[in-house]
Amino acid sequence: MVDLRAELKSDINLLDQKVGQLDQKFGQLDQKVGQLDQKVGQLDQKTTSLGIELAKTQLRIDRFENNIMTTLRDFKSEILSAIDAFAGEARDYRRKDLERGHMLMVQDDKLQNHETRITVLETAK
C-alpha cells in the first residue's frame, strides 16, 4: 500500500507538473493572442488610413479630370471661333478677289476695244 501511495503521490506530482506546464503554455498562448490582437488592430488602423487616402486621391483625380474636360471644351470653343473668324475672312477675300477679277476683265475689254472706240469717235466728228 505504501508503494501504491508513493506511486499515486508520484503520479499526482507529475500531473501537477504537467498542469503547471499547461498553465505556462496557456499563458504564452494568451500573450501571443494578445500580440496578434494588437497587430490586427494596427492593420485595421492602416487599412482605414489607406481607405481614407484612397478616397482623397480619387476625389483629386475626379477634380483633375473635370478641370481637364473643362479646359478641353473651352479650348475647342476657342479653336472653333478662330476657324469661323478665319473662314469669314477667307470668304471676304474671295469675294474681293472675284470683284477685282471682274474689274480687270472690264478694263481689259476696254483696252482691247480702245482702238475701235477711238476710230468711232474720230469718224463721228
Image (cartoon, rainbow, N blue to C red):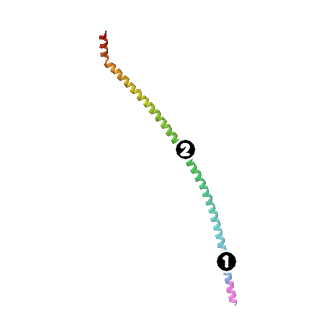
Secondary structure found at label 2: helix
Q: CA distance from mark 1 to mark 2?
A: 71 Å
Q: Main secondary structure of the magenta part?
A: helix
**Which of the two discs, 1 and 2, labels the residue nearer the N terminus?**
1
User: Which residues are the magenta region?
Assistant: 2-9
**Vertical placement of 53 versus 87: above or below?**
below
**Vertical placement of 38 versus 21: above or below?**
above
| Residue 93 image position (x, y, % from top left) | 42, 28
| Nearer the camera: disc 1 or disc 2 | 2
Examine the image and state in which quarter residue 21 appears: bottom right
Q: Residue furthest front?
A: 124
| Residue 9 image position (x, y, % from top left) | 69, 84
At 49% from the left edge and 35% from the top edge, which residue is drawn? 81
At 47% from the left edge and 34% from the top edge, which residue is drawn? 84
At 61% from the left edge and 55% from the top edge, which residue is drawn? 49
Q: Is residue 87 left or right of residue 39?
A: left
| Residue 40 image position (x, y, % from top left) | 62, 62
Q: Is residue 88 left or right of residue 106?
A: right
Disc ID at residue 67 = 2
Examine the image and state in which quarter residue 15 appears: bottom right
Disc ID at residue 19 = 1
Q: Residue flagged by tag 1: what amino acid is it?
A: Val
Disc ID at residue 60 = none
Secondary structure found at label 1: helix
The tally of labels here is: 2
In the foreground, 99 or 81 = 99
